[in-house]
Image (cartoon, rainbow, N blue to C red):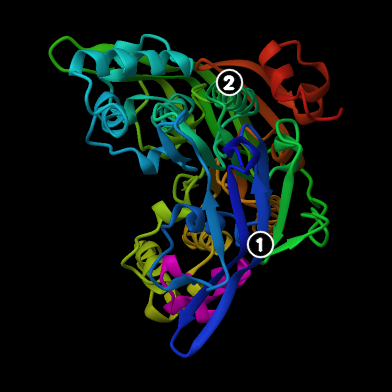
Amino acid sequence: MDKDYHPLLTVNNLTVYHSSFDKVSPLVENLTFSLQKKERLSIIGNSGSGKSLTFKAILGILPENLSLSKNTCIQINTDDTFKKAVSFIPQNPQLNLNPLITIGKQLLESLEVVESKADFKEKYAICLEWLERVGLQNTPRIYNSYPHELSGGQLQRVIIAIALCQKPALILADEPTTALDPILQNQILTLLFNLADSLESGVIIISHDLELISKWTNKFIYLSEGKQIELYQPLSSNQLINKNKQLKEEVLLEVKGLSVRYKKGWFKPTYFNALDNISFTLKKGESFGIIGVSGSGKSSLAKAICGIIPPYEGKITYFNPQQGGQMIFQNPYLSLNPIFNIHKILFEAIRTLKKSKEFNRHRILEVLSLVGLDESFLLKFPHECSGGEQQRIAIARAICVNPSLLILDESLASLDVDRQISMLNLLIDIQNKTDISILFISHDIKRVIELCDNILVLSNGSIIASGSTQEVLQNSQSDIVKELLVNFPK
């Protein structure tokens, strides 16, 4: 029979086991599906449902302590029109691009797999062509740049170029829009599927955002605890609790005329203005939202307030400087020392208070209880905790020194909907008990509106809208704000 009549990918009875001592536990059970050429398939599920394990099984890269059942059959049926069978687009480009090697060299390494006979000039031209095809401007500069010199959206486009330049028959994309704003999410998904169609490739995409991904695919697999289910209800038992507070008039933080500049190069340096004349005040006990597209200056503002980067102009004033602010980063695993257990991680923070051993022990147990974890976690290491537990530990580390301000920089971006709601409930509960202020930086307008009393919108380092949450939601005339709010019902 002609190959065109065979599925591109066939997966029968996919079962993945975890072996620990004498115990064998199934992590994915009896998953069966197929994918045709040029077809689009979404795998939907919460964290820990088995989505990424399914990809690893297809790619043949399961960890040593995981194994496939003897009845599992995975078959890829490709033909000579494709140069490579499978290409993989990982979730976090910052973690998957070598920080010490230029973008061009990493793209060349990928291209070498399918274009080994071409000379350097031909390969260089192909690299620039692919950088253009993924929508990047000034491609020679991008080619010679290092990953840290590009924005998150640019890095995601680079990752797509690296994967697709090999002209694969099958593309596996693992949450390719997780940390991107809604505008960039649509741009990246449009780009990915248009390029896949031009190559006639099949696509399987992992997501926890059913609302977003349903616009792009019409075939779905829903996973829950490793099993395929018929219905997907991410919020079945996890709803946002009501906020119970009244805003105080006491000002905690004042930012006045803040500008931040970055320097690039040494002999003939150039400067980039990340923030320009930013001013706002934050009251005690207030939840203040900062929103904007990728590259708008949100993270630069957070780092300047925390003192990680110095302001070029302007002034940042804490009216309670003894307590100050603590920052909770986007990726909890990268912000937790992997060689420290949880007790050591919390102790390293709390010992800066210079209190007694008895106080330190009591405070560690107190903050663990506050974030919903018990004493058994103290002996665990970060890699032994789930993503949600890691984020709770990061919050515990931040609040254990009694800060007056918590700064969350896209801290919920990598979590599924259930865990996002859980984290918001945790923050609201902590705020109700401690009267702490929260600066919530995100591109997820839904979560910002649910948590924040007031909002400030950034674009290209400047403020384009500010005011109460409802005022910005209903009355803003900015095109950027309208695009960010396009999927949010008023």
**Residue 28 colored magenta?**
no
First in residue order: circle 2 vs circle 1: 1
Tell which residue pokes out farthest to the right in this image.
490
**Residue segment shown in magenta:** 365-384
Q: Residue at x 53, y 83 (%)?
A: 24
Q: Name the residue under label 2.
A: 458
Residue at 47 percent across and 46 percent down: it is 329
**364 in relation to 376, above or below:** above
Amino acid type, callout 2? Leu
What separation in Å lies between label 2 and label 1 (alpha carbons)? 44 Å
Q: Which residue is drawn at 81% across and 28% down?
A: 470
Q: Nearer the viewer, residue 75 or 294?
A: 75
Residue 226 makes an appearance in the image: no
Q: Residue 31 carries which label?
A: 1
**Crowd rating for badge 2 (residues with CA inside 10 Å; few <14, some 14–19, many 20+):** many
Secondary element at tag 1 = strand
Q: Is the magenta stretch mostly helix, strand or loop?
A: helix
Residue 159 or residue 154, whichever sits in front: 159
